[in-house]
Amino acid sequence: MQRLSRSFTLSFPWSNPRRREGTEEHHRVLNYDIWYTIASYLTIRDVRSLTLVCKECRAATLPRLLSSVDPADESKLKKMCSHLSKSTYFSAAHLQGLRIGWQPLSPPYFAARWVGCRFHRKSTIPHALATLLSQAVNLRSLSLHRIEDLIKAEPRVGEALIALKHLNTLELLDIGRRTWKVVARVESRPTSLSLGYDSRASSRRDLIHLTRIPFLERVRKLRLHRFQFANAPMNTDLPGIRSLRPWPAVEELYLSYSLYLPFYRFCPNLRILSLWWTWMTSGTDMDMVAWPSAVPLRRATMGQLDAQFILGIPVHFLNLRSLYMNADLTLQVLRESSPIALSLWCSNAKGLEADLWERLVTVANAPQARLRYLMTTLYVQPNDGLCWLVSAVILSQIRI
């Protein structure tokens, strides 16, 4: 007998071999709500074990068990599709979160996610996924890799995706022209959208495709991966730029391996910006892509080279990540963005310039500086230990 709280008692009859009778009565001490609350604190693996306790427990833990499903390989993906499509109790209708990564969708000899995937005509995966999605009517979160190849191999995948009505989060990777047609017809109105290229190249018309997404005006978190627009300059000649309408709901934008976009032009209420390996091409209209210096950002996370795009923009929390930190560029960003909180991440601390910390203190103590919090993540050799910190003791001089 173990007491969980003053309000109820949880019995474990099997802990005493003499007490095997009345097991169901002991379990009924806990109602549905209590089992549901217990399951919310457990991992998916522990929840699977908890479902074997009793019928009441199984019913209450089912939402947690099917809240997030992520098969690791092809065999588990096939078993999941077969079980959820045919099972009466654990049916696809109970599924709330589904993520199909690139590993289950690729043959074993594919070692890279950017290698194109072409399903064999005898492959059962596209058909099984289409059946599963058509039955998963209560799905809230969906992430699908190789989406273009899935739709090409089985068009019903696209039709099932269009028919889903309750999606809050949608992630589609390795997209193509078929995917754009599907996204333009999606009936759900998700608030989080992720789109990305991998094995296919982005085109100059992608901005037009984005403007045709019916629910984009409701999206609050937007992620774009490898949107390079065929390296076309960002100016008035880019298709779709003239008819671009603002997306006022977008507050968070994550851009990786892409061209720098006119964020303020179509995301005027942007507060959180993340950049990783972004660039501009010659011929870019700087007035078009410039962010107004009077509009602050709540949080900015980016590589050190990407920080050039936010120079002069006030940032509350700035997170700089770099393989090799350049002291001059780091201090320039600190001076011109004037963050209140600064996080520095560097994978090669041995290459840091000796006077970086002293110069950082000088910049932080300037009259116009706002820095109050400094976080550092540095990867050093075991023999180096905290040697870098010895020269940084002067950081205590930063005013509080």
Image: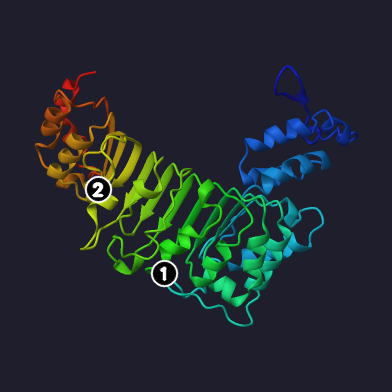
Where residue 329 sits: x, y (%)?
A: 16, 44
Q: Which residue is mark 1?
A: 114
Is residue 101 toward the left or the right of residue 130 in the image? left
Tag on residue 309?
2
The residue at the far right in this view is 21
Pick whichever, 334 or 269, lies toward us: 269
**Residue 94 sits above or below residue 131 on the image:** above
Question: Which of the 4 image quarters holds residue 273?
Answer: top left
Q: Residues within 10 Å of mark 1 (few under 14, many from 20)?
A: some
Where residue 19 sits: x, y (%)?
A: 86, 32
Residue at the (45%, 75%) spot, across then down: 116
Gap between marks 1 and 2, in whole Å?
A: 28 Å
Q: Secondary structure at mark 1?
A: loop
Is residue 128 toward the left or the right of residue 190 in the image? right
Q: Closer to us: mark 1 or mark 2? A: 2
Look at label 2 and name its amino acid: Phe
Q: Report the quarter where the C terminus lies.
A: top left
**Residue 360 sits above or below residue 381 on the image:** above
Is residue 81 toward the left or the right of residue 266 in the image? right
Look at label 1 and name its amino acid: Trp
Where residue 258 sits: x, y (%)?
A: 34, 59
**Residue 144 sits above or below residue 47 on the image:** below
Q: Secondary structure at mark 2?
A: helix
| Residue 305 at least partly seen | yes
Where residue 277 sits: x, y (%)?
A: 29, 56
Pick whichever, 343 or 177, lies toward us: 177
Pick whichever, 52 or 323, lies toward us: 323
Q: Earlier in the sequence, mark 1 or mark 2?
A: 1
Pick whichever, 152 or 267, lies toward us: 267
Residue at the (39%, 40%) spot, across then down: 272
Q: How is the image coloured?
A: rainbow
Residue at the (36%, 48%) spot, across then down: 265
